[in-house]
Image: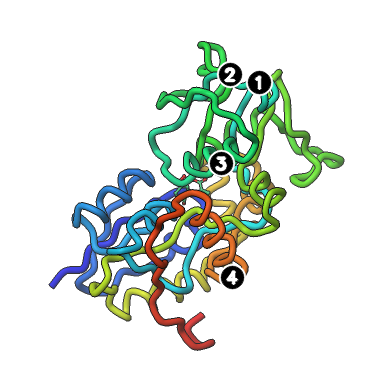
Amino acid sequence: MTYRAGWIHFTNVAPILDSLTLPPGVTAITGVPTQMNAALLSGEVDIANISAVEFIRHADILEALPDFSVSVLGPVYSVSLFHTRPLEGLRRIALTAQSAMSVALLEVLLRGRGLSPVLERAEGEAEELLASGYDGVLRIGDSALREWYSVVGPLTAERTMTTLPDSGRGVTVTDLAEDWFRLTGHPFTFAVWAYRKGRPPPPELVQAMRVARRHGIGHLADVAARHAAMLGLPERVVQHYLWNFRYHLEAPDRLGLEEFAAKAVPDHAPLCFGERPGQEGR
Ligand SMILES: C=C(O[C@@H]1C=C(C(=O)O)C=C[C@H]1O)C(=O)O
């Protein structure tokens, strides 16, 4: 019987997915986070890297792999609120329809500051939307990374990835994962690999994912060079972007995930994870 996977194929998962060889009997489709969230919940796929908030909301029926995630400690660079006035003064924010997790994170961060601007779904480039009546725009993924760089870049000998400003061209960029870190001191987990309880992936698939991740992280410069060319960004940017991610789901990531779950979905069912692999599983 076929086991169907759904992959969010953003650059941030390239170190896992680029060299993944699917075992016989496993098929895969790709899409943006909200598409993969829907595909898993409707049963169109059996496993997907989904927005962690959807895993939390559906913790009664879903379980997640215990050692895979897209997490970060501090800035993520690709989940940003672009804004033209201070956060406290924001009145109308455009949200991307691609995201569930980042929208939920933005809501938690705004609520924590006692702010309640109007949030509306609207697609388009951040700077276009800012010119058309929004004073804040939430963007995620590859296009958000590109837009972040075009606002705060370029890198020079003196301006490194960690010393770039947080504004340029009249636009301020608030990195939501960095804001979460300032608030909680925890990493932020954007995605987990979830499946329906009682329908875990074949062990060969999980093992193939671990092999692919080991290969991807071991060859990060090559992965970054390939994707930098596709994104039209300097290799230095993409290399830093990728090595900054945490692709396992370790104790600090789980603490962050639990804290986020308590804030965003207070009545959620307990989060379930499959059995942790031994050291050789990495
Ligand atoms: C870091 C990112 O994480 C992604 C963001 C998601 C969301 O906002 O729902 C879902 C999965 C993640 O892989 C990104 O898109 O840039």
Give the SS element for disc 1.
helix
Q: Position of residue 267 (x, y in %)?
A: 41, 55
Identify the residue under disc 2. 135
Residue 218: mark: 4
- Nearer the observer: mark 3 or 2; the answer is 2
Query: Based on the displayed image, in which of its 4 quarters is residue 229 positioned?
Result: top right
Left or right, 262 with reference to 234:
left
Are discs 3 and 2 less than 8 Å apart at CB?
no
Between the residue at mark 3 and the residue at mark 2, the CA separation in whole angstroms equals 17 Å
Identify the residue under disc 1. 89
| Observer-nearest of 215 and 171 | 171
Are discs 4 and 3 less than 8 Å apart at CB?
no
Q: Position of residue 207 (x, y in %)?
A: 39, 79
Q: Earlier in the sequence, mark 4 or mark 1?
A: 1
- Nearer the observer: mark 1 or 3; the answer is 1
Q: Earlier in the sequence, mark 3 or mark 2?
A: 3
- Nearer the observer: mark 4 or 3; the answer is 3
